[in-house]
Image (spheres, grey):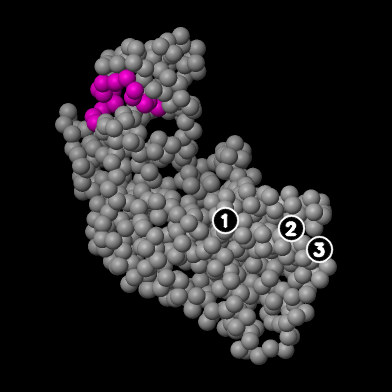
Amino acid sequence: MDFDVVLVLATFVATIIGLVRFQQYPAHVFGALLLFLLASGLVGEEAMLRSMANHGLVTLVLLMICSLALEKTRLLRVVTAKIIRPDFRLTWLKLYGSVTFLSAILNNTAVVATLLSPIRNNPYHPSKRLLIPLSFAAIFGGTLTLVGTSTNLIVNSMYLETTGESLNFFDFTLTGLVITLVCGGALFVFSKSLPNQGVQEGDFHRYFVDAKVQPESKLIGQTVEQAGLRHLESFFLVEIVRDGRLISPVSPQQLIAEGDRLVFAGDVKKLMQLTQFEGLKLFADQNGLLGSNLREVVVREESVLVRKTLKDMGFRARFDAAVVAIRRSGERVSGKLGDFKLRAGDFLVLAVGDDFDGRQNLDKNFIMLTDVEAESRLTGWRETVAVGGFLAAIAASAVGLMSLLKATTLLLGVLFATRCLTPNEALRRFPLTIWLIVSTSLMLSFALIDTGLIQQLSSQLDGSVGPEQAMLALVVIYFLTYGLTELVTNNAAAALMFPIAYGVAQGMGLNPLTFVMAVAFAASSSFINPFSYQTNLMVFNAGRYKLKDFVKVGLPICLFYSASVLLTLPVIFPF
């Protein structure tokens, strides 16, 4: 075995060890790998550029950027409003069905992020019974199509680089359907063993926002549940101020009336979702400043605002700014924003006018913190363009009208042209970690092939094997990928195992597609370790679960999932 083969093998093993040791920093490990591959001469400049501009990788990045526009629409919020019902079984089935369907065509991380707050704050059911099923349903749904999860797209990018052909949009669907049905039934049974409790979380550490129901609002006469105000992302309706009296806590069946002041608590970055409710005006909106820049400030001890209300001080005229939200450390804020008496140390989010920075009284009244970049929301025809354009691009690719790369490129151009998405938003949310992991993994794959390591592995295998040996090889590849997924991350596991799986299939004279699909499905099978898959980590933190909660539900689901994959793949993609 020559030196280059030994070196690339050692590099491969060192990469896995590095990913296990530094599990929370995969980008650092792959960044170091990229530099080493270049410095050692295992890959050249041409291979590096080929990897970074890989057809499948560019498609993946474009798809993730285009999906950002969908996050700014009401699509997921409208679906969410229909899910939570008093009957637990109906809620569970609606949640499972909606999440699996949406995750088949949308980024499953975005789906879970949107549903986290409504489920955690739902008034009917223990949230811990629903949050793990939410994450698992998103994983199952991601296995249904080529675009359902980044893992599938990563495997496709490497398959395209190796064979020159792309996987079809629905190659994953039959196996994914078996997984969705079998594992869904098992999940319903085993999720009953989860803690029968909700997640109690105080509201005092979050920003409070005041909005007024206008005379023409369509919210008037609807219940809080019907209006969708119980199902906001990272916001919760805390109280209603009506005719000088407080209604708190707010029942889902509480009717909304003209002139009501609705007080919300939550993440101020998600503020703009409130503007999607017709006839609901925020305090800053009434002052004509909501669309401007947002600043976070703290009220100074010597400020003239201390023990005064915003209404008394003429805040807009004095500072050319309007208060969007208030937060008081250690205490819950209550009542209308304009009537709220300020204290030293109160945190304010201000929508500022053009003259704000020129005012001479800022340093006397505020400690200036940072700009707050509120996530913008799409309404009207722009919302139609974003949703319709995304679905049209997916449909065009699914029916073979054009490649997914071409469809997403055209869609991105339309989104930029119509201001549904801005270049700054795209740059800020550019999936740099995924791009680095996939491109570097492709470079490592080239090194494995160019040094002859994969060929040597293939040549050691007997090309004339029976069904038993073929099945054993498939099981070994599947569980090696699964083990890496639980130890490192799903994307890294798929990228590292692909060249080995492909080489084993070639060496044994078997259908490579069977093994490629096994890698894709195994890399999505993270159910026991909450830290190895992003949606699992999200619900783990939101639900305040213990590791044993994931183990007692995830272990049986893992067995059902693995059996579904290993029994169906040889039927759909014969050896």
**Which residue is pictured at 68% across the width and 50% down the height?**
32
Q: Provide the residue span drawn in magenta.
A: 334-349
Residue 388 higher or lower than 237, as above or below: below
Q: Gap between marks 2 and 3, in whole Å?
A: 15 Å
Q: Specify whether 285 is left or right of 45.
A: left
Determine which of the numbered discs, if any, sits on residue 443 in the image.
2
The secondary structure type at the circle numbered 3 is helix
Q: Quadrant of the N terminus?
A: bottom right
Whole-percent x, y for residue 515 in the image = 63, 75
Determine which of the numbered discs, if any, sits on residue 4 in the image.
3
Q: Inspect the image, locate mark 3, and give the three-letter code of the amino acid beneath it.
A: Asp
Who is closer to the viewer here, 441 or 209?
A: 441
Name the residue carrying label 1. Answer: 21
The secondary structure type at the circle numbered 2 is helix
Assess whether residue 338 is covered by the magenta stretch.
yes
In terms of sequence position, does the residue under pointer 1 or pointer 2 come before the other?
Answer: 1
**Which residue is pictured at 69% across the width and 62% down the height?**
12
| Quadrant of the image occupied by residue 569 | bottom right
